Image (spheres, rainbow, N blue to C red):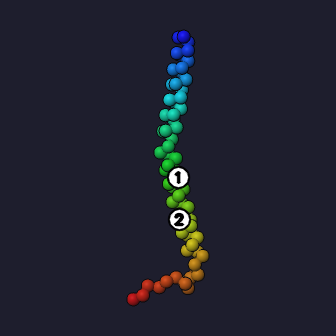
Amino acid sequence: MTLGILAFFGVLSILLFAIRGFLDQLPDVFASARRARIAWRDLKHERTEEEQPEGSQSQPSA
């Protein structure tokens, strides 16, 4: 009985330690995802600017 209780709490502590480690990494994952999304948006924006012919850019009217 005592051995079972010790085993249960041992497994529980390892599980909590693993969950804590995973949760500690989430802010870095979200920051990386945000940087990747911004880089992708900038890449698409640059690509669309390169594909436009230079004469077809709209000129501001005065």
Amino acid carrying label 2: it is Asp
Residue most extreme to the front: 1
Sequence-first disc among 2 and 1:
1
Q: For the point 51% across and 25% down, which residue is it? A: 13
Mark 2 packing: few (<14 Cα in 10 Å), some, or many (20+)? few
**Image coordinates for residue 4, horizontal then vertical, percent:** 55, 15
Amino acid carrying label 1: it is Ala
Q: CA distance from mark 2 to mark 1?
A: 14 Å
Residue 33, which numbered label? 1
Quarter of the figure with the N terminus: top right
Q: Quadrant of residue 44?
A: bottom right
Residue most extreme to the left: 62
**Image coordinates for residue 60, horizontal then vertical, percent:** 43, 85
Q: Is residue 51 above or below residue 24?
A: below
State the residue in front, 19 or 42: 19
Q: Quadrant of residue 50?
A: bottom right
Q: For the point 55% across and 74% down, which residue is it? A: 49
Cβ atoms under marks 2 and 1 closer than 8 Å: no
**Image coordinates for residue 45, horizontal then vertical, percent:** 54, 69
Left or right? Give the position of 19 relative to 51: left
Q: Quadrant of residue 7?
A: top right
Mark 1 packing: few (<14 Cα in 10 Å), some, or many (20+)? few
**Image coordinates for residue 16, horizontal then vertical, percent:** 50, 29
Quickly name the residue at label 2: 42
Residue most extreme to the top: 1
Q: Secondary structure at mark 1?
A: helix
Q: For the point 57% across and 72% down, which residue is it? A: 48
Q: Secondary structure at mark 2?
A: helix
